[in-house]
Image (cartoon, rainbow, N blue to C red):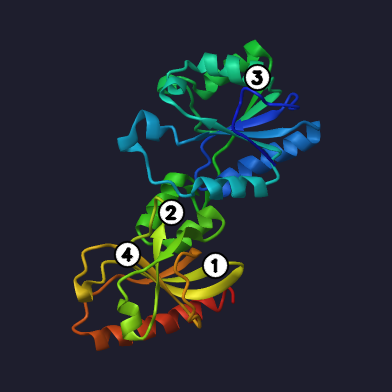
Amino acid sequence: MLLIKNIKKPKGIKSPIVTLGNFDGVHIGHQQVLKVIRKRAEKLRLPSIVYTFEPHPLKIVAPHKSPPLLTTLEEKVKLIKASGIDYLILARFTKEFAAQHPREFVSDILVKQLAVKEVLVGHDYAFGKGKKGTIEYLKKLGQEFGFKVYIIPAYKKRGFIVSSSKIREYIQNGKMKEAARFLGRPYTISGKVIKGRNIGKHLGFPTANIAIHNELIPKDGIYAVHVLLGNKLYKGAANIGFAPTFATEKRAVEVHIMGFRRTIYGKKIKMGFIERLRGEKAFRNADELAAQIKRDIERAKKILNKYCC
């Protein structure tokens, strides 16, 4: 896959099949769209393009309404690349771009710059200033400019339409199994290991404290997690919250990596959330907390044994 950031100079792209959208999370609904466009492009022997924006449009036009994103840009690019798409256009979204009329976007970008053959969009797609670019309007412009428009229906799982907003809801409520079903993989967060509160170490269960890169962090509590460090996968028990037993005031994300004792300050670490074990709780003393942590680790180990490592 070729990543294009300068849309004004797309070289060697002829009559592509294009899909448009934000693709936050690249969930199983998005994956269906990517599968359809890839197969359509292969059938017509034409290049496939995913056209998306950076940053998310709401961060520019309505920051107060902008949701916490499910994936970092790096992860989104990686996931789209894995789908087998030929080109990913990462267009810079600005206030000037947001002010464009839908017709201007179609005429200047899709027709003049890309010379699209077909455009495939999801059932709820809208674009342009004030989202005036409805699907019906896009079809009308397609007839005018000579490209076909296809609508990909909503993808459902267990009776629910798969959407980024639904996945966010699951994660914010600690429902990691449900989130994983919609994502097609466990929800992951990544960051750099930093010096922390050393509470776990003093209790006999050392933890890696993480400065998180992601915008969306799961609900406070204890989780069974996979931990990717370098190229090796480990079992882990993660804690998100304020350590109420010790009345700390700063929210932290930390993980006990099972069977691991090396110092890894400054290293990049990635966690995949498998299951929430319980919420945070204030214990009467450190001994009670240590006994509970031991039980949490054993429970997490049993859960993770079904998956890996």
Q: Earlier in the sequence, mark 1 or mark 2?
A: 2
Cα distance between the residues tagged 1 and 2:
15 Å
- Residue 213 shows which numbered tag? 2
Decide which of tag 3 and tag 2 comes sooner along the chain.
Answer: 3
Residue at image mark 3: 113
Q: Earlier in the sequence, mark 2 or mark 4?
A: 2
Mark 2 secondary-structure assignment: loop
Q: Of callouts 3 and 4, which one flags the residue occurring earlier in the amino acid sequence?
A: 3
Assign the N terminus to one quadrant of the image: top right
Q: Earlier in the sequence, mark 4 or mark 1?
A: 1
User: Measured from the top left, where is residue 192 in percent x and y?
Assistant: 45, 61
From mark 3 to mark 4, how far is it between C-alphas? 47 Å
What is the crowding at mark 2: few (fewer than 14 residues within 10 Å), some, or many (at least 20)? few
Amino acid marked by disc 1: Leu
Secondary element under disc 3, as helix, strand or loop, is: helix
Q: Residues within 10 Å of mark 1 (few under 14, many from 20)?
A: some
Decide if residue 12 is on the left or right side of residue 262.
right
Sequence order check, earlier mark of 1 and 3: 3
Observer-nearest residue: 53 or 67? 53
- Residue 121 in percent (x, y) is at 58, 31
Q: Secondary structure at mark 1?
A: strand
Which amino acid, by three-letter code, is at mark 3? Gln
Q: Which residue is mark 4?
A: 252
In contact (CB < 8 Å): disc 1 and disc 3: no
**SS label for mark 4:** strand
